[in-house]
Structure formats: structure tokens, C-alpha cells
Amino acid sequence: MTGPSATFGFRDVDAAEKSGLVRGVFDRVAGRYDLMNDLMSAGVHRLWKDATAARLNPQPGETIIDCAGGTGDMARRFARLARRAQLRRGGADAKIFVIDYNAEMVAAGRERGGMPEITWSVGDAQRLPLPDAAADAYVISFGIRNVTDIPGALREARRVLKPGGRFLCLEFSRPVTEALRKAYDAYSFAVIPEIGARVAGDRASYQYLVESIRRFPDQATFARMITEAGFSQTGWTNFTAGVAALHTARAI
């Protein structure tokens, strides 16, 4: 490597190469992405996502960024909740921008059907195609660990949020006990790549996904990174004893 490095699973690669490698992974898995999430987590990811959407509590007229929003799984949840609030309170439609680096993931989301509140675009979490202070909320779900420059993406999230805007990041994290970590590792490395091979015909991509989870910072370390990016009121909620965690903060 001649320049800065970045993690790609258990490998360290040239930072300039990571985005292309990650794009290749998601090009290959886009068509089976939602099905694989159900199989890998036995459907538990749906509970985590429901809890995240409830915590966001989308309101009529808000502008919400669903960064790395892929197939729109989260954006549809936000739109439904915003509509319910609109029925109670009135007001304008919410605006939800799904922005994902991978065109195949965005295409898969569009094929599933849209909702009037949702706008789809291909874009980079490190260089969002939005002006400063444009959004009331920014959410990134299971995407931040795939970004080449995580501190840079966090600063970009801060840039596009209005003062007081809400930041939510749902990501795989560190189980809270050693026994659970060992059991989770055993399951992840033995089972998830095998499911990928049998269902999606792609063991390598799911091997990368498992490895990328292990390289991601633990809850406290990531919370410090969020604070360093210019956020306040930083905290997290563990899901399934820390297998995943919802990090929350406010733009200063």
C-alpha cells in the first residue's frame, strides 16, 4: 500500500480501493439482501429496525436522510410512521431521502415499489448531495462500517443536519458478555457464509460482512467518534445483548 489504509473485513487495503471492493460486495448481494437479512438473524433484524424507527419518531413535514438506505427497508418504516402522525396532527408530507453508494441496491429498492414521501438517489456518505443544515434527522442502518472514512462520514452527517437535528446509527456491535461473544462468533463464522453460499451463491461476500462486524469499534469507542464529529447527547441502546446497538446523538 502506498497511501492511507482502510479495513476490508480482516484485510487492510489501500483506502482508495475500499469503496470499489464494497461496491462489488453489494452488487452481488443486492437481489437477495432482504431475504438474507431474515435468514441470518432469524427475523430479529426487523425488531431492531422497528425500534429504531420508533425512536426516530418521524413527524409530518420533516426531512429525513436514510443514508446507506439500500432497498428502502428503513425508509418505508419512516414513511408509515410519519403518515400516522400526519393523520393525528395534520401537516405536510415528510420527505425521506434514500441515499446509497450502490446503484444495484437502489435499483432493488425501487423495484420493490416506492411511497410518495421517498426519493431515491445514488450518493456517497462521505459527500452527501445535500446543502448544509438541510435535514431534521439522519439515519444510517448497517452501513457505517462499510464506509472508507467513518469519521468523515460522521462529520458529513453533522453538516447536513439542522441545529438540534437527530442522528441515529443502527449497527452490529459488541455482545456484552464473553460467553455471548464466543457463541456469536461461532455462529457468524460457521453459519452466515454458508447461508450466503447456499441461498445467494456467494460465500465470499458474507465472509466479508462477518469480518467487517468484528473490525467495527465497540459501543463506547464509536460513541466517542460520534462526539468528536461534533454531536452532543451521545448515547447508545444495546439490542439482543449488544449484538446490535442503536447510537443516538443531537447536532450541536
Image (spheres, helix red, strand yellow):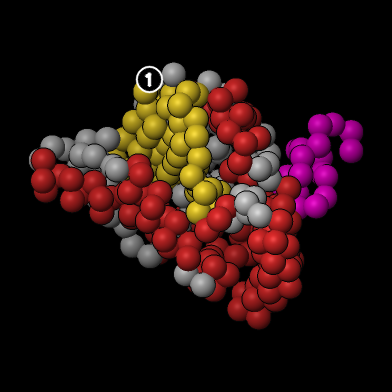
Examine the image and state in which quarter residue 179 appears.
bottom right
Magenta residues (range): 1-20
Residue identified by numbered label 1:
163
Position in image of residue 233 (x %, y %): 45, 26
> Which residue shows up at 43% across the image and 24% down it?
251
Q: How many marks?
A: 1
> Which residue shows up at 68% across the image and 70% down it?
187
**Quadrant in the picture for the N terminus:** top right
> Which residue shows up at 54% across the image and 68% down it?
41
Position in image of residue 213 (x %, y %): 67, 53
From what the image shows, is residue 229 above or below residue 84? above
Number of residues whose C-alpha sits closer than 10 Å to that of mark 1, classed few (under 14), some (14–19) or many (20 or more) = some
Q: Is residue 82 visible?
A: yes
> Which residue shows up at 47% across the image and 23% down it?
232
Asked whether, in this view, residue 81 is left or right of residue 241, the answer is: left
Asked whether, in this view, residue 5 is left or right of residue 76, the answer is: right
Indicate the secondary structure of the residue bearing disc 1.
strand
Examine the image and state in which quarter residue 196 appears.
bottom right
Question: Identity of the amino acid at label 1?
Answer: Pro
* Residue 5 magenta-highlighted: yes
Q: Is residue 108 visible?
A: no
From what the image shows, is residue 244 above or below residue 108? above
From what the image shows, is residue 114 above or below residue 134? below
Position in image of residue 171 (x %, y %): 55, 49
Name, please, the residue furthest toward the right.
Answer: 1
Examine the image and state in which quarter residue 91 appears.
top left
* Residue 170 magenta-highlighted: no
